[in-house]
Image: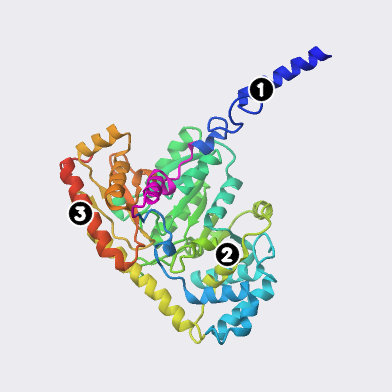
C-alpha cells in the first residue's frame, strides 16, 4: 500500500513539475501555460507606445497622450447638468441645499425621478438595466431615427466594450466562426475575437474614397474566408469611423444592410461617436437603425442588428463613468434571453453609468432652467473639436510625404506617411515596424504619444498613425509646432519621402 501511495505521489510531483506548480519550480501560471489566445491578442492603443510613454513619464519627462480618446484626461471640462444630477442622486441630502448651491430646479426634479426609480445608487438594478433609463434610451432612439424602439431591446452595460464583448461571446463558437472587421479598425475587435477563439476576417476601407465601404470588397473578404473554411457570422462597422474620422452615407449604410441580409451576417454597429459630427450639413451621422427603418425593417431587410453607444464620447466625454447601451433589432427572442442571462451573471452594471446614459439620452430641452448653460457647454465643446479637427488635418497635409483625409467626425486623424527607405531600414535594424519606429521617435523627441497604423491594420506598403484631436486649443500651436518640426527633421535625417515601400 505504501509503495502504491509513493508511486501516486511521484506521478503528482511529475505533473506539478510539468505545470510549473507546487512541488516544482516557478509559477503555476506562466506566459506559456495560460490561455494562448490571450497571449496572441494585441491592443495597440495601450501597447508598446503607451508603455514607452509611461516610462518617459516616470522619468519626469513631459508626455502628451494623444493615443486614446479620453477627453477629460486632456482637460475637457465636464458638462454641468449631468454632474449636478449625479451629485444629488449620490448624496440626496444635498437636495435640501440645492438652491443655495445654485443647482437648478430641473436638476433637482431629475434627481428625484432617478432616486424613485433606482432606490439607491448603491443598489443592484435589473441585469438588463434600470427600466426608467432603458425607456429614456428607447425614446431617444425613436426621436433620432423616426422609427420605434422597444425598451426591452435595450441593454445597459459598463462601457460599450463590455456590451461588444458580451455579444461576441454569444455569437462566436470557435475558429470556424469569422468576424468581419474594417481595416483599419479599433483594435478592441481583433483582440476580442482572438480571445474568444474566433477568426478575424478583415475588409479594407477605401482610403481614396473618404474611407467608405465597398460592397465588392466585402464580397472579396467573405469569399476568401469561406474558401479557407471560415464562415463569417458578424460584420463590425464603425460609424463614425475610428480611427478614420469619417461618416458613412445613407446609400452606403443601406447597401451594407442589404449585403448582410443576403449573406446572412449579423451587423454590429459601433456608433459611439455619433455626436462628434463636424460637417452636419454634408456629412451627418445616420444610424443603421434609421437606414434599416427606411428599408422597411424586417419586411424588406431581415438583417440582425446590434448597435452600441456610450457616454464616453461626444461632448460628454465621461469615459470614467463606464455608461453605455446596446440595442438589438431583428434578433431571435430566445437569443435575447441568452444575452440577458449572460448579463445576469454580473448582476448589474454600475448605476452611476446607467444614470449618465439616461442623462445623455434625455438632456435639458428649451424652456428648462438648465438648458441655456447645457446648450452653450455642449456646442462650445463640439465647435472647438471641429476647429481642432480641421486644423490638424490641414497641418498634416502640408507636411512632406503625408496625406490626411479630412476629419469630419469622431476624435481622430489617421494620416498616411510615406517613409524614406533609410527610415524603413533603420526600423528593421531596431526591431520595429516602420510606422512604430516613426511613432517612437516622435515620442522620444516631442513627448507626443500616438498609435502606429499597424496597430489598427492597414494595406500593405502603406504606413499611418492615429492621433486624437483632443488636446486643448490652448496647446494646439505648440503641438502643431512639435509635429511639423519633428517630421521635417525626421525626413531630413532619412533622406525624404522618395519611395512608398
Relative side of 111 to 258, left or right: right
Can residue 320 be seen in this snapshot? yes
Residue bounds of the magenta highlight? 40-62
Extreme residue toward the front, this view: 60
Residue count near mark 1 (Cα–Cα under 10 Å), binned few <14, some 14–19, many ≥20: some
Question: Regarding mark 1 in the picture, which secondary structure is present there?
Answer: helix
Disc on the earlier residue, 3 or 1? 1
Q: Is residue 53 part of the magenta span, yes or no?
A: yes
Residue 232 can be seen, yes or no? no
Quadrant location, the C terminus: top left
**Marks 2 and 1, the one that precedes in the sequence:** 1
**Quadrant housing residue 123:** bottom right
State the separation of the CA atoms marked 2 and 3: 42 Å
Q: In the displayed structure, would residue 231 be above or below residue 59?
A: above
Q: Which residue is mark 2?
A: 353
Q: Main secondary structure of the magenta part?
A: helix
Q: Residues within 10 Å of mark 2 (few under 14, many from 20)?
A: many
Q: Indicate which disc residue 433 carries.
A: none
Q: Which residue is mark 1?
A: 15
Which x, y percent locates residue 296? 52, 63
Name the N-terminal-most of marks 2 and 3. Answer: 2
| SS category of the residue bearing label 2 | helix
Pick the front one: 307 or 488: 488
Closer-to-camera residue (62/229): 62
Amino acid at each position: 500500500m505504501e509503495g502504491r501511495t509513493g508511486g501516486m505521489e511521484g506521478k503528482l510531483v511529475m505533473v506539478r513539475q510539468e505545470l510549473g506548480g507546487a512541488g516544482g519550480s516557478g509559477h503555476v501560471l506562466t506566459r506559456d501555460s495560460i490561455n494562448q489566445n490571450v497571449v496572441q491578442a494585441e491592443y495597440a492603443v495601450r501597447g508598446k507606445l503607451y508603455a514607452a510613454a509611461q516610462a518617459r513619464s516616470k522619468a519626469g519627462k513631459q508626455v502628451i497622450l494623444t493615443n486614446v480618446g479620453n477627453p477629460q484626461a486632456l482637460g475637457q471640462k465636464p458638462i454641468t447638468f449631468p454632474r449636478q444630477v449625479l451629485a444629488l442622486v449620490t448624496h440626496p441630502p444635498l437636495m435640501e441645499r440645492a438652491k443655495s448651491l445654485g443647482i437648478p430646479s430641473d436638476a433637482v426634479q431629475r434627481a428625484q425621478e432617478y432616486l424613485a426609480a433606482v432606490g439607491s445608487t448603491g443598489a443592484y438594478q435589473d441585469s438588463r438595466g434600470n427600466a426608467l433609463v432603458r425607456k429614456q434610451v428607447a425614446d431617444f432612439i425613436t426621436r433620432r431615427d423616426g422609427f420605434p424602439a422597444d425598451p426591452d431591446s435595450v441593454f445597459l452595460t459598463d462601457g460599450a466594450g463590455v456590451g461588444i464583448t458580451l455579444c461576441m461571446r454569444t455569437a462566436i463558437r470557435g475558429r470556424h466562426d469569422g468576424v468581419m472587421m474594417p481595416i483599419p479598425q479599433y483594435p478592441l475587435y481583433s483582440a476580442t475575437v482572438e480571445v474568444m477563439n474566433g477568426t478575424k476576417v478583415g475588409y479594407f476601407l477605401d482610403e481614396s474614397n473618404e474611407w467608405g465601404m465597398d460592397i465588392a470588397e466585402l464580397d472579396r473578404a467573405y469569399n476568401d474566408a469561406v474558401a479557407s473554411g471560415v464562415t463569417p457570422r458578424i460584420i463590425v462597422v464603425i460609424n463614425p469611423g475610428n480611427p478614420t474620422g469619417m461618416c458613412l452615407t445613407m446609400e452606403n449604410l443601406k447597401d451594407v444592410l442589404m449585403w448582410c441580409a443576403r449573406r446572412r451576417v449579423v451587423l454590429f454597429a459601433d456608433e459611439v461617436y455619433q455626436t462628434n459630427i463636424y460637417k452636419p450639413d454634408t456629412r451627418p451621422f445616420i444610424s443603421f437603425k434609421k437606414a434599416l427603418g427606411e428599408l422597411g425593417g424586417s419586411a424588406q431587410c431581415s438583417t440582425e442588428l446590434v448597435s452600441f453607444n456610450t457616454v464616453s464620447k461626444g461632448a460628454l466625454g465621461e469615459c470614467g463613468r463606464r455608461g453605455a447601451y446596446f440595442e438589438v433589432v431583428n434578433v431571435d427572442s430566445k437569443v435575447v434571453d441568452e444575452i440577458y442571462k449572460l448579463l445576469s451573471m454580473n448582476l448589474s452594471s454600475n448605476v452611476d453609468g446607467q444614470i449618465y446614459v439616461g442623462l445623455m439620452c434625455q438632456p435639458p430641452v428649451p424652456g428648462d432652467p438648465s438648458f441655456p448653460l447645457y446648450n452653450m457647454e455642449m456646442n462650445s465643446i463640439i465647435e472647438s473639436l471641429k476647429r481642432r479637427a480641421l486644423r490638424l488635418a490641414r497641418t498634416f497635409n502640408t507636411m512632406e510625404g503625408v496625406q490626411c483625409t479630412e476629419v469630419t467626425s469622431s476624435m481622430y486623424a489617421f494620416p498616411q506617411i510615406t517613409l524614406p527607405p533609410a527610415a524603413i531600414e533603420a526600423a528593421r535594424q531596431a526591431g520595429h515596424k516602420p510606422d512604430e519606429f516613426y511613432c517612437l521617435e516622435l515620442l522620444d523627441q516631442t513627448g507626443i504619444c500616438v498609435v502606429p497604423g499597424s496597430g489598427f491594420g492597414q494595406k500593405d506598403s502603406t504606413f499611418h498613425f492615429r492621433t486624437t484631436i483632443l488636446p486643448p486649443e490652448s496647446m494646439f500651436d505648440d503641438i502643431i509646432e512639435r509635429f511639423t518640426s519633428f517630421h521635417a527633421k525626421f525626413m531630413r535625417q532619412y533622406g525624404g519621402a522618395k519611395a512608398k515601400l
